[in-house]
Image (spheres, coloured by chain):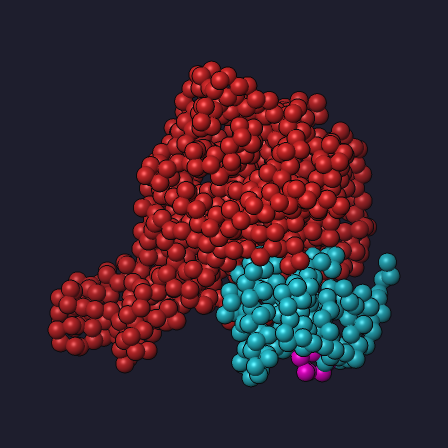
Amino acid sequence: MGPEAAKKNWVGKPLPRKEEDRLLRGRGKFADDIKLREMLYLRFVRSPYAHAKIVSVDVSAAEALPGVVATLTGAELAPQVQPFIEIAPDPGGKIKDYALAVSKVRYQGEPVAAVVAESPSLADDAAELIQVEYEALDPVIDGEEALKDASILHEEAGTNRVWRGVFEYGDADKALKEAAYVVNIDRMHFHRFSSTPLENNVVIAQWDPKDERIYYQCNNSFPSFAIQFLAAHLQVHIDRIRVQTSDIGGSFGIKITTYPQMAVCAMASKKAGGRPVKWVETRSEHMTSSAHGNERTFRDTRVALDKNGVITAIVSRHIDDCGAYPRYEPLGCVIWSQVFPGVYRFKNARIDFSQAVTNKCPVGPNRGYSRMQHLWFLERVVDICAHELGIPPDEMRLRNYIRPEEFPYTTPNGCVYDSGDYPKMLQVAKGLIGWDDWKKKQAEARKQGRVIGIGIGTTLDSGTNNFGQSQIVNPGAPFSGNSQGANCKLDIYGEVVVAVGSCPQGQGHETTAAQVVADVLNIHPDLITVRTGFDTERNVHTGFSGTYASQFAVSGLSAVHGAAQKLKAEMKRLASSVLNTKEDDLEFGAGAQGPEVRARSTGKSINYWGLANIVNVNSAVLPVEMHDVTLNCRYIWRAPFKVPDTVKKYGSLTLTYASQLHIAVLEIDRETFIPRILDYVAVDDCGTVINPGIVEGQVYGATAHGIGAALMETCVYDAVGNMLTSTFSDYTPITAMNMPKVKYGHTETPSPHSYSGAKGMGEGGAAPIHTVSAALQDALFADGIFIDDSFNNADSLFRAMVGKEISQAKQLVRVERRT
Amino acid sequence: MPETIEKVAIRLKVNGKPHSLQVEPRKLLVELLREDLDLTGTHVGCDTTYCGACTVLMNGAAVKSCTMFAVQADGAEILTVEGLEKDGKLHPIQAAFGDSYGLQCGYCTPGLMLSTAQLLANNQQPSDAQIRKAIAGNTCRCTGYQNIFKAIQRAAQTVKGA
Ligand code: FES
Ligand code: FES
C-alpha cells in the first residue's frame, strides 16, 4: 500500500464491512451451524396453560424410548440450584424463578420438563411422551387487572405488583392550577410486540466432568450478564463458565434473557455424563416463550398548558406489564426515565409507575427498550393537545422542543442531553417530504372523501446506560456506571489483533473497530484483524460487556481507541530505543516492509514484525528498562457516571442522546380500511458518524421494525392466555411488500461526551410507531376519533371508523379551558 | 410411533456435486443440506414457510427447503448459497449485496440471494414492484429492505451487462 492510502482518515468513511465476505459466501458461523462430537439434542415440554398447578409429571415413557439419554423436570432441578437472582426489591424480590416450572406454570409455553436424545427428531418424539397433568387456575392477562390481585401469580410475593415508584419533579399541581388549558386523557395503551430476530435462540452447553467447567457456544447477546446469573444459579465459580458467541442472526435485545435455557442445557449435559447438549429454539417457541417487549398502559393523564400551547406539566399513572417473571425487569421501570421529558422543555411532572406480572411471556429488552413506550406516550400527549388546541403539530413541537442553545440540557430528573438540534431536524424532514405540498394534497384529497394524515414523531435513542439507575429500582442493587473492555496487540509476527467485549449481530463492529485502530496507527483497516464474536476467555469483558442499548460507538469504540493508544505508546517507546531517536521524532505508517514506525530525522524504520520479534521471541535484546512493554494492551473504558440520588430519582442515567425525526404521510382506504404509507422520511442525528453506510443501514432497520410494530406486528392473547400469534404466519413480520420507500436524511451534532463525538444508535427510539400514530391521529381527529393504542391495523381502524368501538376523543379526552 | 423408520435411497446433485443418500422419509430438505451435507449456509428462521431463510434453487426454481421433504428432491439439481461463487470469485448478486450494504447480520442473505437469482434468471430489468414481489417470501429483520432493493437493482445491472 502506498503512503497515500496510509494518510487517509478511516473514521467517517463508508467502508465495506469486514464481516461481509464470509456471510455472502454462506460461510458465516452461526450457533446452529456448530456440531460437536457426542452431541445430544434437547427439547422442552411446555405448558399449554397460561396459569395452572402442576399435579404430576411422568417421564417414564420418554425415558424408555431408545435413544433418549436423560430427562429433567422442575422438581428434580430445583433442589440442585439457587433460584435466579431477582433485581427487584421486595415484594418482587421474593419471587422464586427457576428455569423449569416447579409447582405451577405461569404462562403458555413455560418450560416444564426437558428431554435429551441422540437426534433432534428423537428428542421431539420423546417430548411427546412426557405426560404432565395440570389443574387450571384463573389467568390474569391484563396489567391493570393484575394489580387488583384477584388471582396471584407468585404466592411468595403475595401480590402481582412487582414494583412501584413515583417520579416527581418540579411542582405539577401548581402548574395545573395555573394552566390556561388542562387536557385530560383517560387511557392509552402501548402494545406488546417483539423485534423477533430471524435466527432463533440457540444454546450448546457442555458441563465437562474432566475439568468441571461449563462450555457454552450460543447466541446470547449479553454474555457477561448471563454468566453472573448462571454462576449464582448453578453455584459455580464464575470463571468455570466459558461463553463463546460467533455470528449472531440478529438480537435487538431479545437474546439477552436466555440464561434460563442456558441453565437447563448445562444441567442436562451434567446429567448426560458431560456430553454436549444442543437446543435450537423453534419459531413458535420463540414467539411464545423467548421474550416480548414491555406492554404499558397510561392512565388518568393530565396535561397543563399555557395560553400558547406550551406544556408546563404532565401528571400520569403508568402500569407496565412484564409478563410472568420480572427477570431483567424491573430495570424497565426506570430505564424509560432516561428520556423523562422526551425532546420537550416541560419541568413539572409526576409519573406514578407500577409494574405488574401477568400470565404472559416474560418481557425483556426489545429494541427501543422501555423508552419507546414513554416517548410514544409523550408524542401522543403533544399531538392530542395540538389538535385540541387547534395548533398545527409542527408548530406545537417547535413551541415545546428543547432549544438548540440549551444544550447540554439537564432534564428535570438530572439527565444530561449532550447535544441536539430538533428544530433543524424538523426543517430537514419537512424539506425532504415536501411538507407544504402534502398539506395541499391532503386538503384536496379530503374534499374527495379520502382520508389522509400527516404525522411527526420526534424521539431519542439514549445510549450507554448508567447502571446506577438499577439502584433507583432497588437501592441494594450492586450495579453502577458502565464500562467496556478491549485489547489491542501486536501478535508474534507483528499482526495487529483487536478483541472487544461486544457480541455484534450485524452492526459491523469488526469494521468500525478496525477503522478506529487504523486511524491511531495510520495504516489500512485491512491490516487489522478484529476478533469475531464474544469469548470470556479473551479476558476483555467487564460485567457490562455485550451488545445492547445503543452503545458500541461510544463504549466499545472508546475501549478500542484506548487500547490502541496504549499499544501505540508502547510501540513508540520501543521504537525510539531501537532507532535511537526521540519519541516525537517518530511517525507511524506503512512502508515497503509493511506497517512500520519511522524516524523522521534519519529515515530509518522498524516494521511491526521487528517490534513484535524483540518483545516475543528475541527478548534478550530488549533493554531492561523496557521489560514492562508487552505490545499486548488491555484497556477498560469507564463512563464518567455517579450513582444517582435514589430518593429523588435524580441523576445522569445515560451518556449520549441520538435523536430521530420522522414524518409519515398515510392514507386509510375507505373500502378496506387498510392504512397505506404514501411517503416517509427518517432524519437521524447520532453525532459524529463513524461509518455512514452502517448508520444508514441501522436507521432503515429500525424504521422497518417500527412500521411493522405500528401496523402489523402484535402479540395477541385471548381471554384465557392462549397466544394467538405464535407463528410468523400469525404474527406477520413486515415484508418487502409492506415496507415503504424511506427517504433518509441526517443532521450532525457531535457529542461532547464521547472521544469521537459519536453517539450510540441502533434502537432508533421506535420513531415510526409514534409517527404512524401521529399520522392516523391527524387523519381521524376531525371525525372525533382518538388514537389511543400504538397498534393499528385495518381491523382496528374499521372498528374505529365504522363501529366506533375504539375510544373517541369526546369521551376519552376532556379539555378544561380557563381562558 | 414406529420403533424404526425405514430409510429411503435418494440421489441428487447439490451445487453440481452428485450425492446418494439414505434418508428418513420425514427428513426435510433443509435438514439434509445442513446436517448430512454440512452446507450450513442455508438457514432456518420459522416453521410456517414464511421467512425464506431456507430458500434454495431446485431445478432453477426458488423453493423453501424447510417445506420440502428430502425425498421430494430425489433426482433434482439443487443450488445453495455455497454454489453461487465461481472459482472463489463472488457471483454478481453476492457482490451487489455486499456493495450495497444489503446485509447486516447476514442470516437472511443466502435465501434472499437465491430468490434474486431466480428473479434475474427470468427478468433482467425488474421494476421496483417486481423486485418486491420476488422477495415477498423472504423476511429480513435487520435491513428494512431498502438496501436490499438497491442490491437487487445493482445486481440486475451487472447481470445484464455481463
Ligand atoms: S425456514 Fe423456511 S420459510 Fe422460514
Ligand atoms: S440481515 Fe439480519 S435478517 Fe436480514
Q: Which residues are drawn in magenta? A: B14-19
Instruction: Answer yes or no: is residue A540 visible.
Output: no
Q: Residue sitting at 84 percent across and 66 percent down?
A: B5
Q: Residue A354 falls in which quadrant of the image?
A: top right
What percent of the width, then of the height, locates residue A817? 53, 19
Q: Nearer the viewer, residue A117 or B80?
A: B80
What percent of the width, then of the height, locates residue A710? 62, 44
Q: Relative to residue A659, is residue A74 drawn left or right?
A: right
Q: Residue A307 falls in which quadrant of the image?
A: top left
**A512 is within the stretch colored magenta:** no
Name the quadrant of the C terminus of chain B.
bottom right
Q: Relative to residue A486, is residue A715 drawn left or right?
A: right
What percent of the width, then of the height, locates residue A467? 43, 39
Q: Residue sitting at 36 percent across and 43 percent down?
A: A419
What percent of the width, then of the height, locates residue A380? 56, 34
Q: Nearer the viewer, residue A157 or A170?
A: A170
Q: Nearer the viewer, residue B151 or A468?
A: B151
Is residue A131 depicted above or below B129 in this figure?
A: above
Q: Which chain is cyan?
A: B
User: Which hue belongs to chain A?
Assistant: red
Q: How many marks?
A: 0
Q: Residue sitting at 73 percent across and 74 percent down?
A: B61
Name the quadrant of the N terminus of chain B.
bottom right
Is residue B51 depicted above or below A722 in this figure?
A: below
Q: Main secondary structure of the magenta part?
A: strand
Q: Residue sitting at 37 percent across and 68 percent down?
A: A525
Q: Nearer the viewer, residue A525 or B21?
A: A525
